[in-house]
Every structure is written in C-alpha cells, then in structure tokens.
Image: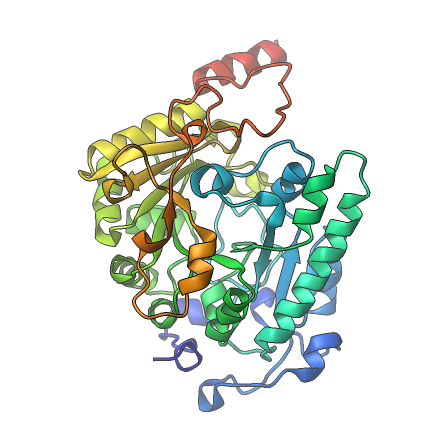
Amino acid sequence: MRAESVIARCRPGRSEQIQDLSVIPDQSTSQRSIVARRRPVMGSLACWRHASMISEERKTKMESQNWKVVGSHSATKLCRWTKSMLQGKGGCYKHTFYGIASHQCMEHTPNVSCANKCVFCWRNHINPVALSWKFDVDEPEDIIEESLAKHYATIERQCLSPNALEHRKAEARQVRHCALSLVGEPVAYPKIEAFLRGLHRRRISSFLVTNGQFPEALQALPTVTQLYLSCDSASREGLEQVGKPLFRDFWERYMESLDILSKRKERTVCRLTLMRGVNTATPAEWASLLKRASPDFVEVKGVTMAGLFAKTGLGTMNMPTHLEVKQFAEAVAAEMPGYSLACEHEHSNSALLASDRFRGESSWRTWIDFERFADIWDTSNVKALDYTAPTPDWALLGSPAEGFAPTETRKIRARPRPLTSEEKENWRSSRIA
C-alpha cells in the first residue's frame, strides 16, 4: 500500500477534537518558490480544504531561530555538529556509531508537523501539530533542490570562518547524508517514497526518525539507509506522560510500529531519550518492549536541555550523566540476550547497544558502507548486513577518548562533567551556598 493512501487514517476520539491553534492551517499564507508548483493529493481522503502548513507568523518565528523554511511544509537547519566537524572540533554521535561525516550531513524534515507534544522536545514546540494531512503537498524534487540550495548557502557562510578547515570546506559542499530528524513526522509526508528515492539517486544516505504514530505509512515506507523509532517510554502511562501523543489510540499505534520495525530488512534503531526519575526506573520493562521491535541497534541518550523544561517541569537533575547512561544501557543489555554495548560518545551523552549479528570475527561492524548502500538501494531485498563496515577502535565502548575521533581537536573543559547526578547536585549546592 502506498503512503499517499494511508496517511489520513485518523480514528475518532478526544484527540481528534483538539482546538489548539497549531492544528489549524493558515489559509491566508502566500507562499513563494516551490509552492507555486505544488499539487494537492489524496482525493477523498483529503480535508475539505487545502492550506499551507506553515503560516507567515510561524515562518517568521522559525527563521528568526535560523531555520530555513522550504516551501509550505518542509524545513532545514544547520546542525551544530556540522559546523563543529567543519572546524575539526568533533563529529556527532552518528559519526562515532555509524561513520557518517557530520560536515556532509543536512538536517531536514519534509513535514514539520507532529502528532506528539513531547515534554523534552528540543525544538521547543516551534512546529505545528496535525493528526492527518490537511495541507497542500509540495513536490519531492522541488523540496530536495531548494533544501540543498539553502543548506549550501549556509555552508558557504560557515566556510568564511577562519576556523573552517580547508579540506573540510570542499567536502562540506557535497551533502552525503540527510538526517530526517529535524522536527515533525517525516513518514506523514504523502510523497515520502519519491522523496527518499530522490535522495538515494543523489547518493545521499537517509537517516529517518519516526515517532511510531503512523504505522500504515511506516509499513509502506521504501528502503532507507537507517530507520529509527523513537521510544520515549516502556509503558502506556509513561508514553502518555512523556510523549503527550494526540491520538487516542496512541499505544496501539506505537505497538504496531514496533511490530513493523521487527520485520524491516534495512538497519533499524530504537532510540531512547533518558530522563532521570521519569523513564529510567525499569530496565527489564524496557528490554521487554525492545525485544518486540527486534532492532539492530538501541541508542541510549541522555535528555538534552531544552527551553521548554521550565514549562514541562523538567530540570538539569533529570539529565543523567554519561556514566549513568552507560549504566542504564548495561542494565538493559543484561535483559536482552544477543545484544551488547558496542560504542559510546561521551560528548553526546550516549551509548549504543548492538545486535551480536554485527559483531565480526575480530571487531564490531556498526559502521555503514555508504558507497555500497548507494550502489544497491534500488535492488530487491536489501538487508542490513549487506552494507556494514568495521567500527574503529576509538569508537568502541571503553576507548580512552570515550568515542571522540582522533582526527579531531577536542576543547578541554575547565571543569570536567560530573560523573554522577549526586556529584552534580553537590556542585550546585556549593554554588548556592
């Protein structure tokens, strides 16, 4: 079943009656560039009106925060790790875990709207929410071309910095990876299949993240380089508290998405965002949930400080230390036969559990052979093990640099990060005193 035919599934219930203004599209918006060539789709499944997803007011707010709005429902934004690696100061955790070149990565979304209002959203709910596609649909090729143009323009400005490395400048001018994790729900874009094919034809790898609230669209998704499912809680009550999903049947959708993930052939990942005192108390329960998805990898990452913490009741004490993240990951791995801790990235406060299927004869093979994937993505029956590469020693758990690449120059903190939350609390108390 094609994605165009399934996005509008929206079961009746309290969530469908939401009156939040962010759900209601702005009919007065006048869009330029690629929107002039957009075409509405979905026929009878579409809402009674088509409108722009991003109002002029929202667009102004987003662009004031350095977002690059693309058309009527897409956006791109320079990741801080792209800038960091351009200057030789270190790559993101995906560089350590999977071998991407962070300075050649474009962070993007073809759909800024989301069906969740997560309490830890690092984008501070700047995007609208929507339960079905009620908007105009921009063409995939137009989105890709305009996104790349805006990304390259941003890169050129970064290349003016005296800190940018000459050899990295040339590399950064060629996007090789697209992280579809900027904000929103990529699978809900009705033409996501053509969008992904457009990336892959350009030999750009795809890292797509879904919240698991559109299982039919997930089922219809074509092969991606690496497919993520965000896992915010291991219980129905916890997901309702943390993810703030808008669908009434959010748990059933989440469970169906886990089942779909278990049957996918490409590389799959369950991504956990840990909040101390919120969703870290039950490793065994987490293990039970993760077994259902049978992912190739489990990313365990400490929550990042967000501007909306004050509104959602979170604080720095809910942010686990890197040691605590690793300890939690070890506890989960102990409940999951066939999985082991493989990598860590202290700078991102994250650790990687990997299926033992990715343990080679002499080392782990968590890295991706991107050239190999670019050669085979449109062939039949592409499997996760078809495009692996050896993981370097510096990226492995327990390496002296804790996942920081030896090719980079690390800024040494004047005060090391605390090892435990108790140490963090003692430091805070001493400052107050």
**Residue 210 is at least partly visible in this image:** no
| Image quadrant where one finds the N terminus | bottom left
Between residue 267 and residue 330, name the one nearer to us. Answer: 267
Left of 57 or right of it: where is 79?
Answer: left
In the picture, measured across the screen, residue 148 lies left or right of residue 2, that is right
Q: Quadrant of the C terminus?
A: top right
Determine the residue positioned at 58% across, 9% down: 430
Left or right relative to 211: residue 152:
right
Image x and y of residue 204, in percent? 54, 59
Q: Residue at x 61, y 49 (%)?
A: 104
Location of residue 78 in the rendering, given as x and y in whole percent from the top left corner: 66, 49
Locate residue 10: give its quadrant. Answer: bottom left
> For this rendering, which residue is in front, 199 or 124?
199
Relative to 240, residue 90 above or below: above
Please say if 214 is above or below 118: below
Question: Can residue 356 be seen at all in this image of the molecule?
Answer: yes
